[in-house]
Every structure is written in structure tokens, then in C-alpha cells.
Amino acid sequence: MKKALIFGISGQDGAYLAKNLIDHGYEVAGTSRDAEMSPFANLDALGIRDSVTLHSANPADFRSVMQVMISTEPRCVFNLSGQSSVGLSFNQPIETMESVMTATLNILEAIRFLDSSIRFYNAGSSEAFGNTLSHAATEKTAFRPRSPYATAKAAAVWAVANYREAYGLFATSGILFNHESPLRPPRFVTRKIVKAAAAMARGEGPRTLVLGNLNIQRDWGWAPEYVEVIRRMVETDTPDDYVIATGHTHSLEDFVRLAFAAFGLDWREHVRIDENLYRPADIAYSAGDPARAETDLGWRARILMPEVVQLMADAERSGGQMRPQATGRGHT
Ligand SMILES: C[C@H]1O[C@H](OP(=O)(O)OP(=O)(O)OC[C@H]2O[C@@H](n3cnc4c(=O)[nH]c(N)nc43)[C@H](O)[C@@H]2O)[C@@H](O)[C@@H](O)C1=O
């Protein structure tokens, strides 16, 4: 059986990736900083908590990384750990840099020390591109980060590329654009919106949702589809970095409108803008070109933003549960 280790298994992507790997015959181990205290609610939501082994590990601590890698003996390692909120990174820049960059370096070094044939996937981010302006970003587009989080992710992607070139490691980064699901915490804007609209439709909670800049534009995909391409990136013959996106960009105002409409509400009656929620610097327009992932890995996003909204709204209506088929779409 193929053995996988996921650093950061408790988050949205960690849980979906664990499920995807189990469904494809992997034995999965995963880490959280304190596995005894972590609720692992996402693993419970997907019904896979008893199908994985859980370990405490702090990826920013080299000893901790070595210990968990020695005890689990993985054939492939996925790094999905680290502080993932762009907004929070402005207030916690050092924690963000350490949890992203130091962690990535620790895992790369541990692979060199222990077994350089281990395959490694690192979670990059479209944030590293900054504003993509008129051209959708490809794997060749220069990074122009606009947040501490983006700076850390850009550095980590370059570290992975450097270890691939310098030491011949099978090391790869997925440069993923925004990808959403009911497992997103409400700190991220899509879940914040859908959760609030659902509560209003039920007649619960505040009648007004306070948001920041609605003019920003993003490429929002469906997280369960994105973990499928993550697995393909470590299963392919040649390691490389890939832009993962739907190829379609929408404004946040469009997302808000569709989300409220999904609950029979008019967003203009329920949304208030507060400039205090604006970031010190933000990405106004973000577009990605996933053509290479389709050519090399046979992957293409099928669930586009309007369906992302519908699936999140459906899940919110049924108390956060998803229809089984919505966890993934039989990619070929
Ligand atoms: C690819 C990237 O994707 C995610 O990062 P993000 O794009 O920052 O995600 P978000 O949902 O926090 O913000 C999206 C946009 O929405 C604007 N916005 C307006 N009003 C609110 C608001 O009230 N809350 C939030 N959170 N954002 C708001 C906000 O200013 C920003 O422009 C992470 O997965 C990250 O890990 C990652 O790698």
C-alpha cells in the first residue's frame, strides 16, 4: 500500500486530500500541531477520521518533522500546513513566514536526510502572483506578492524549485487559486457570505452582513476537485509546478449576489460595506491559466463559481453536510 503523510491534515484541503488518497488506495497519516487537542471536525465531516493515523507535529520545528517522518515512513509527503489567512498575515507576519517558509524548508531537508526518493507536494498560492492584470497567470508569470502571506508562499515555491534542481528531488508546488467548500472556515469570505445568508433565510442572527471590498475579482474553484490534481502531481512521472484554477474570474459582488439569491434574498438589502475590513494591500484582479495542468495531468476544473455557490448553499441548508457526489467529480 502507498503511504502518504499530510502535514496539516485538519484543514479544508488536508481533509479532502486525505479522503481522495484513501479512495485511491493510500494509507494516510496526518499531522496537526497538537493532535490530542485538535477537534479534527473536517475529518469527521468526511467520515474518515478512523481511516487515518494522526500525529502531533510542528512543521516549523525540524526535530518534530524528522520524528514524524521517521515514524510514519511515507513514500509521499504533502505540505498543506501553515497560517493560511492573507488578512491575518498582516498582523502575524513572522508566524506566517515561519509556518510557511521554515516548515517547507524543514520538510525538504528532512527528505534529503532520510530518503531523497520521497515525493513531495507543497501548497503554493496564487496570492504570490499579486495582481495579474490583463494576462492570466501561468507557470512562467513572475511573482509580485502583496501580503506577508504571499511573500512567504512565493519564497516556499522558489525553495521547492531550488531543491528540485539542486538535489534532484521529486518536489512540486501547486499554485492554487482560491478554492472553496463547506469546510472553509467563515474567516474566508465565501463561507462568511453563505453562512450569513443561510442564517438570514432561517430568520436567525443579524439581518446585515458587513463586508470589505466587493470590487475585488477572484477565480473561485471547488476544493474537492483541486485535491484531485494535487494527487496527480505526485503520481506523474516528472515533478513540476502547476497553476491550478478554473480559468474564470468573477467579482466578489457577483459571488454575494448569487449567494443571497440562492436563499431567495436580495443582497442589496442585507450587505453593508465597512472600509475597516479592507486590507493594507489587496489583489484587485486575479486570473489563472490552468492549460498546462490539463495538458500534462489531464485535469480541468468542472465546477465553476456559480455552482460553487450552489453547492455551498446546499450544504449550509443541510447543516454543513454535503451530498456524497459533491465531494468530487469522477475525473478521468
Ligand atoms: C489563494 C488564496 O485564497 C485565500 O485567500 P484570500 O483570497 O485572501 O481569501 P479570502 O476569502 O479571505 O478573501 C478574498 C477576497 O475577499 C475580500 N473580502 C471582502 N470582504 C471580506 C471579508 O469580510 N472577509 C474576508 N476574509 N475577505 C473579504 C478580501 O479583501 C480578498 O480580496 C486563502 O485560501 C489563501 O490561503 C490563498 O492561498
Image: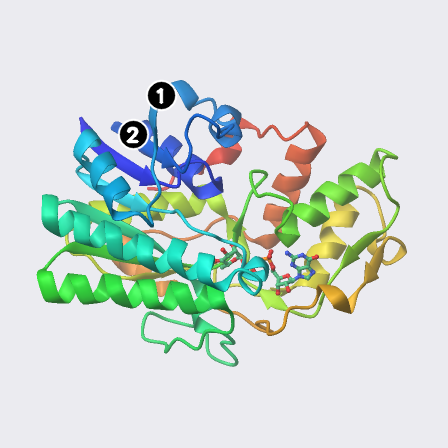
Q: Amino acid under label 1? A: Ser
Residue 70 falls in which quadrant of the image?
top left
Residues under numbered marks 2 and 1 in contact, where contact means CB atoms less than 8 Å apart: yes
Q: Residues within 10 Å of mark 1 (few under 14, many from 20)?
A: some
Residue 73 falls in which quadrant of the image?
top left
In the image as oriented, which residue stretches furthest toward the top?
A: 50
Q: Secondary structure at mark 1?
A: helix
- How far is the residue under mark 2 from the one under mark 1? 8 Å
Camera-nearest residue between 231 and 96: 96
Left or right relative to 174: residue 92: right
Q: Residue at x 32, y 52 (%)?
A: 103
Q: Which residue is mark 2?
A: 28
Q: Secondary structure at mark 2?
A: strand
Q: Amino acid under label 2? A: Val
Could you say where residue 244 lies in the image, as x and y percent from the top left? 40, 58
Q: Residue at x 25, y 35 (%)?
A: 68
Ligand 1 location (quadrant)? bottom right
Could you say where residue 28 lies in the image, as x and y percent from the top left? 29, 29
Q: Is residue 260 above or below residue 25?
A: below
Q: Which residue is mark 1?
A: 51
Could you say where residue 19 lies in the image, as x and y percent from the top left? 39, 31
